[in-house]
Image (cartoon, rainbow, N blue to C red):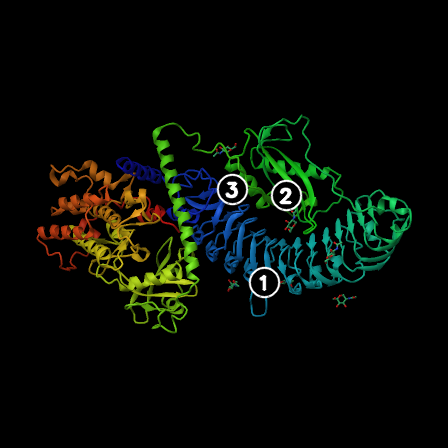
Amino acid sequence: MELQHKVILLLLLLFHLLLVSAQTDSRDYSGLTSLTQSWTNKPQSWVGTDPCGSNWDGIRCTSSRITQLKLPGLNLGGQLSSAIQSLTELDTLDLSYNPGLTGKIPPEIGNLKKLKSLALVGCGFSGPIPDSIGSLKQLTFLALNSNKFSGNIPRSLGNLSNINWLDLAENQLEGPIPVSDDQGRPGLDLLLEAQHFHMGSNKLTGTIPSKLFNSSMKLEHVLFDSNQLQGTIPSSISLVSTLEVMRFDRNKLSGGLPLNFKNLGKLSELYLAHNNFNSSLPDLTGMNSLTYVDLSNNSFNSSDIPSWVSSLPELTTAILGDNLLSGTLNLSNGYSNNLQLINLVDNSITALQPNKVPNFQLILANNPICLENGVSQLSYCKVPQVIPAYSTPPNNCSPASCSSNQISSPNCKCSFPYTGLLISRALSFSNYSNTSYYKDLEQTLLDTFHKQNVPVDSVSLSNPFRNSTSDNFQLTLDVFPSQTDRFNTTGVLTIAFLLSNQIYKPPEFFSPYIFKGDAYGFYGGEPGSKSSNTGIIVGVVVAVSVLVVLALLAGIYAIRQKRNARRSSELNPFVNWEQNKNSGTAPQLKGARWFSFEELKKYTNNFSESNTVGSGGYGKVYQGVLASGELVAIKRAAQESMQGAVEFKTEIELLSRVHHKNLVGLVGFCYEKGEQMLVYEYIANGTVMDSLSGKSGIWMDWVRRLKVALGAARGLAYLHELANPPIIHRDIKSSNILLDNHLNAKVADFGLSKLLVDSERGHVTTQVKGTMGYLDPEYYMTQQLTEKSDVYSFGVLMLELVTARRPIEQGKYIVREVMRVMDTSKDLYNLHSILDQTIIKATRPKGLEKFVLLAMRCVKEYAADRPTMAEVVKEIENIIGHAGLNPNSESATTSETYEEASGVNVQHPYGDEDFSYSGVFPSTRVEPQ
Ligand SMILES: *[C@@H]1O[C@H](CO)[C@@H](O)[C@H](O)[C@H]1NC(C)=O
Ligand SMILES: *[C@@H]1O[C@H](CO)[C@@H](O)[C@H](O)[C@H]1NC(C)=O
Ligand SMILES: *[C@@H]1O[C@H](CO)[C@@H](O)[C@H](O)[C@H]1NC(C)=O
Ligand SMILES: *[C@@H]1O[C@H](CO)[C@@H](O)[C@H](O)[C@H]1NC(C)=O
Ligand SMILES: *[C@@H]1O[C@H](CO)[C@@H](O)[C@H](O)[C@H]1NC(C)=O
Ligand SMILES: *[C@@H]1O[C@H](CO)[C@@H](O)[C@H](O)[C@H]1NC(C)=O
């Protein structure tokens, strides 16, 4: 145990060493910690507490604020919690290709007002796309494709006036395409900067609104394929003169092409297959940019094939199979050099002029012309093409024979490539034997990687495949590393980001594309694995790993807890609460009021920012004024820190029964509209921490500090001994002791307490929760929680009161420091150097030695050696009594300002910090969710 204690102290110490030079804004650090707490597969470089200062993979900062979170392709697991909202300076968020990221997108994402790029491609997210995304006014790039989002396309997206790329494809979105209406509600027609509407492979219904398109738009790619849209294509689309790719295939559209369709002079790819179009074949003459037209599997009817099919100058491909086309295909006036394929399978073509095989691929199978005897041997009567195999050939070398999972690159080096599928959503060629297309792709990919300084040796493409469900064309992409045989995390992130964010621009014939990255399992060369052999650094790594593992375990436990909670909340005990407060299901309340959501909303000015008085992992605390004029503090649980209904009910029943003058009283609660809020009395004079730091301007003399310690001890003793069932606070610290108008101490935040309900009164095993510096090492090691854990934290608080130092400051742990300099044979136990100078300046602090001795007993290593809180109360009462004071007097005389009492020139021990006290603590809080 002695050794373990030392390890813990070392751990705390070293952990803090890393904090001292932190460049990262503490809000961002704590936000990131809370966000990623339960994530799996985090990068190995995420060591320490300073993401900005120590180059964490995937994180970029600008003057200490986290501005970019680029984590695609890491195989991360977990959820996107509302803690994301803490990263308020974020401009880029990319979590693509992490299928283990699941659950809903929290509405709080709407608070990231500076976000310009949001990419969540190919993850496991589900539920609705939150409306609040529409408030991200700076957004230019939004890719939510290939998830499991359901519900409607939120009309609020119409508010994204800067959006350029909007990709919602391959989800389960349903309902109509939203357009603005006369009630002033927004819709996609307002997106005048958008060049990309990619909405394919969803379940959208209704007609295509005429209002969706007009001449002010800059749309280049309009993809609504594989939905359930009905009606006709509105003629307004002819006004979008920038249009290059149009996909409405695989819907239930009918009629024909709209008027003035030929105005779309830049249209290159037209995909209308698998609909119910029933007009005559459209006249596309003059649309000289067309390269690829697929009108197959409709009811287009024509007697004779129009000449544009063979004469349009850029056209490579005309797919007109499965229609009602008859008559003659006339090629006697020649045909374009660029033609690669005319597919007329399953029609009623009777003649070909001139009757000879052209030098492009012609398919007339299942037409009368091919049903006569003898002609079935003609090449154009054969069943359609298959795509020839392709794989990037070696680059003038012989492939190496590689061991295990390594692959020989085109340059014949064995390595572990990063892989994925490169998918064209609108291919504009059909001659798959012409490998120059593949060569072009390979070269442009390589150029992009080299330009971005990614250490890439070569790329290879293979397995060309046309997916008949979506008509997308896919290739397997292998990216091979140079220098080493594998990419490190940085390499993978960079490659994945270039592809997820469309920074790689493919040749026109492949555009638009998407990439779906595979998990990469061959990391090597991460920092830490080859760090220097000095004991300290090894120590840090070991210590931090222990912490990470513990945090992870805590996270897993929390998830399990939450699952249990969710299960039990299904038996909603609140059903009849509001209507029938006296029924058996209503909680047994003593004095605590029920508040409606609307009431609390009103009292807090709509939960406005200006009413916020605190926030943390659990959510936010708002100041409110009740109708009676009473001031209250309203603690509003964040979505992910909510308890099950049963637990919440138990908790408020308990809290409403806890009444003590040294405990912050519960006024009421709200459980409505998916909210859990606790309403507490408002305590005016801030926290002990703010007082000691000089932040609140309230200076406490020595006697006041003794009384504060006594008050807090009495509150705690009550929780331990008199509350039924007993309550262990678990997070005693100076920021949880509040000061009322008379500077009496009130213990706060026991709303998160773990009840001692276990059958065997003694200890409960639970996830480690608490705050670094105050944590009982025994509890930390064993996870056996007893009241003595609170006693430990209380001992640390006592040391804080005499030193006005934080528990961990500049790498020094207060308990260790006091032990180090303490000498009971000397005056003031030789503590002059670490005592708060403001209390020893004026008069001799009476009883200080005894107070310190008591504190040191509270922080004894073995819980059994520590006093109980009731004993602590008695001892402090004695100390105060010996000092000639009445422990029960409630004088308010010491409410002086810091300057008045201590003199302006005294440098306050907290005052010269370059980072704020309150900022450091939440970041080191070990608390699941
Ligand atoms: C769109 O923005 C306007 C103006 O900022 C705002 O009033 C409106 O509520 C927003 N609409 C939606 C649906 O978000
Ligand atoms: C296009 O639509 C937008 C939004 O409906 C509107 O503000 C704009 O005036 C329209 N432009 C034209 C030329 O009709
Ligand atoms: C095409 O189909 C639509 C819907 O089925 C029908 O209303 C319309 O009359 C048809 N038009 C022609 C020319 O057959
Ligand atoms: C044509 O489309 C229908 C549905 O629209 C589908 O059932 C059928 O299989 C398609 N035919 C071919 C040859 O793809
Ligand atoms: C074809 O595309 C559909 C829709 O995008 C997808 O669900 C399916 O997995 C794809 N098939 C293959 C073999 O990739
Ligand atoms: C990752 O690899 C790149 C290029 O090989 C190298 O410059 C970088 O230092 C590596 N990063 C780490 C964290 O090892």
What separation in Å lies between label 1 and label 2 (alpha carbons)?
31 Å
Q: Quadrant of ligand 3?
A: bottom right
Of 617 and 672, the residue lying toward us: 672
From where the camera sits, is residue 289 visible?
no
What separation in Å lies between label 1 and label 3 (alpha carbons)?
35 Å
Mark closest to the chain's N terminus, 3 or 2:
3
Give the residue type that dot 2 points to. Answer: Leu
Specify whether 134 is left or right of 15: right
Residue that carries the numbered disc 1 in the rendered image: 187
Image location of residue 471, percent across then percent down? 69, 50
The numbered mark at residue 247 is: none
Residue that carries the numbered disc 3 in the rendered image: 74
Q: Residue at coordinates 43% horizontally, 54% vertically from top-left?
A: 563
Image location of residue 411, percent across then percent down? 64, 28
Q: Is residue 168 above or below residue 499?
A: below
Determine crowd level at label 1: few under 14, some 14-19, many 20+ residues with C-alpha closer than 10 A.
many
From where the camera sits, is residue 428 visible?
yes
Of 679 and 648, the residue lying toward us: 648
